[in-house]
Image (cartoon, rainbow, N blue to C red):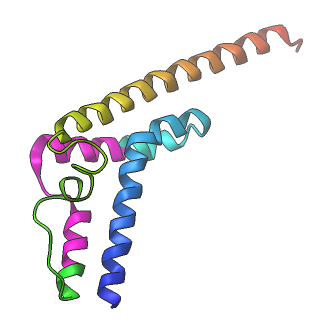
């Protein structure tokens, strides 16, 4: 029972990790310090895709499933839970590209907003009498 609960916790943590991967850059628009955590997640995710190694979060979930006496699914978390459910079966490479494109879009927006904010603060400091 406890092992299954731990497997479920890993499933939820993995989902949160993937959501942060896709949306974290946009969260940084509001909370700029989030960009550093998101950058780490983005680099980690890019490495997993490019080098094609197993995600440790998936490994932990499978470990807990095995310890609980349950069958372990083949492949990775994304192929098992998302492929054919969230997007059409076999479209994972397209979904990965969309995810990375969203990161690029969010970072462009982040830097545009940051430059506007800096420009406004410079203009305000020039206008205020000292």
Please name whichever residue, 127 or 44, is drawn nearer the observer in this view of the structure.
Answer: 44
Please provide percent x and percent y for residue 58.
Answer: 22, 64
Query: Residue visible at 51% across and 26% down?
Result: 110
* Main secondary-structure element of the magenta-colored stretch: helix
Please provide percent x and percent y for residue 117.
Answer: 65, 20
Q: In this view, does 7 lie to the left or right of 79?
A: right
Q: Is residue 107 left or right of residue 4?
A: right
Query: Residue visible at 27% across and 42% down?
Result: 87
Q: Say which quarter of the image contains residue 55.
A: bottom left
Please provide percent x and percent y for residue 56.
Answer: 22, 63
Q: Say which quarter of the image contains residue 114.
A: top right
Query: Residue visible at 17% across and 45% down?
Result: 89
Label count reads 0
| Residue at the limit of the structure toward the right, as seen here | 129
Please provide percent x and percent y for residue 49.
Answer: 17, 43
The magenta stretch is 40-63
């Amino acid at each position: 029972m406890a092992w299954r609960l731990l497997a479920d916790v890993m499933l939820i943590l993995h989902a949160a990790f993937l959501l942060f991967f896709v949306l974290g850059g946009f969260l940084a628009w509001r909370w700029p310090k989030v960009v550093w955590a998101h950058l780490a997640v983005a680099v980690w995710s890019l490495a997993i895709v490019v080098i094609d190694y197993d995600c440790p979060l998936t490994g932990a979930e499978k470990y807990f499933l095995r310890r609980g006496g349950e069958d372990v699914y083949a492949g990775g978390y994304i192929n098992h839970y998302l492929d054919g459910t969230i997007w059409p079966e076999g479209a994972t490479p397209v979904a990965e590209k969309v995810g990375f494109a969203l990161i690029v879009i969010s970072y462009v927006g982040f830097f545009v907003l940051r430059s506007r904010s800096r420009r406004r603060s410079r203009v305000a400091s020039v206008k205020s009498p000292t």
